[in-house]
Amino acid sequence: MAGPGSSAEFVRLTGTAAEALTVVPADRTKAARAAVLAVAACAERSGQPPCGGRLRLTGDIPVGLGMGSSTSDVIAAVRAVASSYGLRLPPDTVSKLAVRAEQACDPLMLDGRPVLFAQREGRVLEVFGSFLPPLVVVGCTLGGGEPVDTLSLPVRMPAETDMREVRAYERLRTMLRRAVATGDVQLLGEVATASAWRGCRVLGHQEFDALVGTARKVGACGVQIAHSGAVAGLLFDPSAPGLRHRLRSCVRALHSLGIPTTRTFTTSSTQEILHGPARVRVDRQAGPHTARRPSRLPAL
């Protein structure tokens, strides 16, 4: 989803200890840790002495829903520190610092290509292609929009299910590889739905069956649910006949189930609209220096 993001401003205070760092807002502890780590890395690379500073973060990503808010803050902090040292760190360095700061991170420091990313190691395992097939997504939130504490989630499945899970995910990986290579939106939806079901066993979302039932009813290709939060979406093929009617029916069906919708957007456009059909366009992908637009995601 293009649009929402984080911005950071870092002011170096020469002559102070590297750990003497203040952050606003004060509760952004992961970004503060990332800034301290970035100071050490940048000082070593540039030959300049490490020092403390003031870090200010702003952004419009809802926290705790699985939309990557903490990783966005961390990346913005690392890039701001690097900029203060006159450096631009490569993505693999940023990802390593992000993992050290928050234990696991999203691959938002990359160029937007669909990848298999080891979130607790900060490295790319496979690049599936240049971009996902175009999709229209009707976004919604589960569990009343309550934040999810990702650090409290179990890291592993029980030992007796490990190999079954590995084989299941390998099958999904093969299917995803084929879906991206052939532009098969229906197959991509099947993979997303299967992945969402597995994630819900950890997160405990009760709305999964209702989402899948709604998807079948309105002709969606599948559903997606963040593995680390409560944000979800129903996936549509933008070339499907009667798309406008399908989207309106989907929003009505979700509302009737008590599932709040957020926005409808496309994966190939920076345009998002509230509770209505998306305009399918092809715009440039959002990058590290793409101008941010105000978020249109309503308060939850």
Image (cartoon, helix red, strand yellow):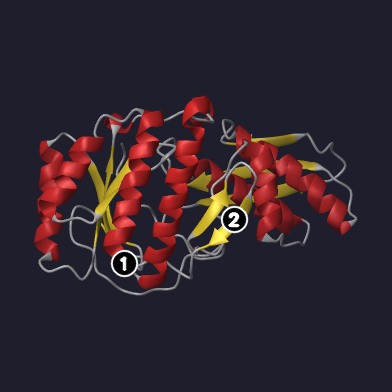
Residue 95 in view: yes
Q: For mark 2, does the 10 Å Cα neighbourhood hold few (<14), some (14 to 19), or many (20 or more) residues?
A: few
Q: Position of residue 154 (x, y in %)?
A: 50, 27
- List x then y, in percent, for residue 270: 37, 65
Left or right of 246 on screen, residue 148: right
Instruction: Check disc 2 and report the residue beneath it.
Output: 125
Would you say 203 lies left or right of 94 here?
left
- For the point 56% across and 30% down, the residue is 27
Q: Specify the label residue 184 is tagged with.
A: 1
Q: Amino acid at mark 2?
A: Leu
Q: What whole-number distance in Å separates the C-alpha atoms at marks 2 and 1?
A: 22 Å
What residue lies at 46% left-to-right and 60% top-to-bottom?
A: 292
- Image coordinates of residue 205 in percent, x first then y, are 31, 31
- Which residue is found at the position 50% from the left and 63% from the top? 112
Give the SS element for disc 1: loop
**Residue 135 can be seen in this image:** no
Which badge, 2 or 1, is on the more N-terminal residue? 2
Between 255 and 121, the one lying in front of the other is 121
Residue at image position (54%, 48%) is 106
Position of the N terminus, as image quadrant, is bottom left
Is 208 left, or right, of 53 in this rendering?
left
Rendered image quadrant of residue 236: bottom left
